[in-house]
Amino acid sequence: MKRFKIAVLAGDGIGPEIMAEAKKVMMAVKSNFNIYWTFNEQLIGGASYDKFGTPLTDDVLDEVFRSDAVLLGAVGGPKWEAIEYDLRPERALLKLRKELQLFANLRPAKIFDSLISASTLKSEVIEGVDIMVVRELTGGMYFGEPKGIEALPNGTERGFNTMVYTTDEIERIAVVAFEVAKMRGEKLCSVDKANVLEASELWRKVVTNVSADYPEVELSHMYVDNCAMQLIRNPKQFGVIVTENTFGDILSDEAAMLTGSIGMLGSASLGPNRNRAMYEPIHGSAPDIAGQNIANPIGMILSTAMMLRYSFNLDRAAVIIENAVEAVLKKGLRTKDIMYEEAEGVREVTCSEMGDAVVEELVRILSTIEPDTEDQSAKFAPDAREL
Ligand code: NAD
């Protein structure tokens, strides 16, 4: 029996609605994979502020440290926009990322065949796209010192930031990216601006050095401006992309939007060891549709698949969840946000109906396969290297 304690932080807006569906999915896979889940449900964001006056209490942080992984819905909303900056719901996320040292952000951009028409690109360009962007999350220009705005003698001002990376910071994100590429059996493209920036020059050198440990992964390098263009021109050329914080912020949004839908994608943020990881959909708390049972739970459900894969090495369970989602879309079920076409067999469903349909499909798939008794408790490789 594999026992996993999950910190379940549903948060605000649609967070609790989509989290309920993700939990149904996790319960549906547990018997076949011999899992015993403990859900440790805690308040975060605006919900925590309303009750405790802070978006993340120390008690919740302690619970997070005692858990094997964190599942997060979303935080924020207009209700909390006017409060002091340090107490805003979004500060809870930054604190969690910092405390857990979540330095690697994995953002997939996968197009589901049934939703090709949702993309703004031509179907022949987008069909089969399945990219993973690995973004460095705790270094680079967003955190580099010195930074600030200072007054100049001529009465104007000067704003400045510093893009800075150390060998260790680059090495650890490169290892995660190579491991992900190895797991997916794909090539790795490292994106930088080494023709202009010294920080990128070091980035390229260190990534190349790390590649010596991964002869099975084909490494290429690309300048960030070219990558932004290539993602639109021919996204299928990419498997895994690894890049620094600022470039990753922009490119991962660009890649995600190739798929045409914000409600469909999950993400993982990984720290230096196995029980330092957080999984969440890429979208926010969608206050405009909260409480109506019309949100799309798929991004949240696919985040749980990522958790099974990257925190618990249960790749087979993750694939089965992904296949169940694909099957439900193929059947024509759509939440409001992905209701693009009026075709025969295509029908609109609620958030909970979508969750139920995924569970139903999961149960059907699981009934056709042998229960998994194999011990897959080996850790995701970056942890094994004790970074
Ligand atoms: P958003 O992602 O919440 O919503 C953007 C649009 O997408 C809205 O029209 C929304 O209805 C729709 N949408 C998002 N997720 C959906 C889903 N699962 N199903 C159907 N439709 C969906 O972004 P926003 O409106 O800019 O931000 C709203 C709040 O969320 C803000 O307070 C913001 O700070 C916060 N936010 C939180 C996170 C997070 O918790 N990680 C991320 C981004 C924004």
Image: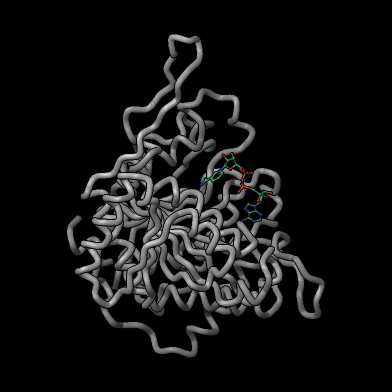
For this orientation, the residue located farthest to the front is 195
Q: Residue at x 49, y 90 (%)?
A: 368
Instruction: Please tell me whether residue 279 is drawn above or below residue 42 in the rendered image.
Output: below
The image shows residue 140, relative to residue 321, as above or below, that is: above
Expressed as whole percent of the image width and height from the top left, the position of residue 262 reads 61, 57
User: Which is nearer the eye, 258 or 25?
Assistant: 258
Q: Is residue 146 visible?
A: yes
Name the image quarter holding the N terminus.
bottom left
Q: Quadrant of residue 328?
A: bottom right
On-image quarter of the C terminus: bottom left
Q: Answer yes or no: is residue 100 visible.
A: no
Counting from the top left corner in percent of width and height, residue 333 is at 70, 72
66 on left or right of 385: right
Q: Quick check: 307 left or right of 3?
A: right
* Nearer to the camera, 12 or 313: 313
Percent across and percent down for residue 292 are 71, 51
Question: Which residue is found at the position 48% from the left and 59% from the top?
Answer: 227
Give the quarter of the image for residue 152: top left
Q: On the rendered structure, is 82 left or right of 171?
A: right
Residue 213: quadrant of the picture? bottom left
x then y, percent, for residue 379: 25, 67
Residues 353 and 283: in front is 283
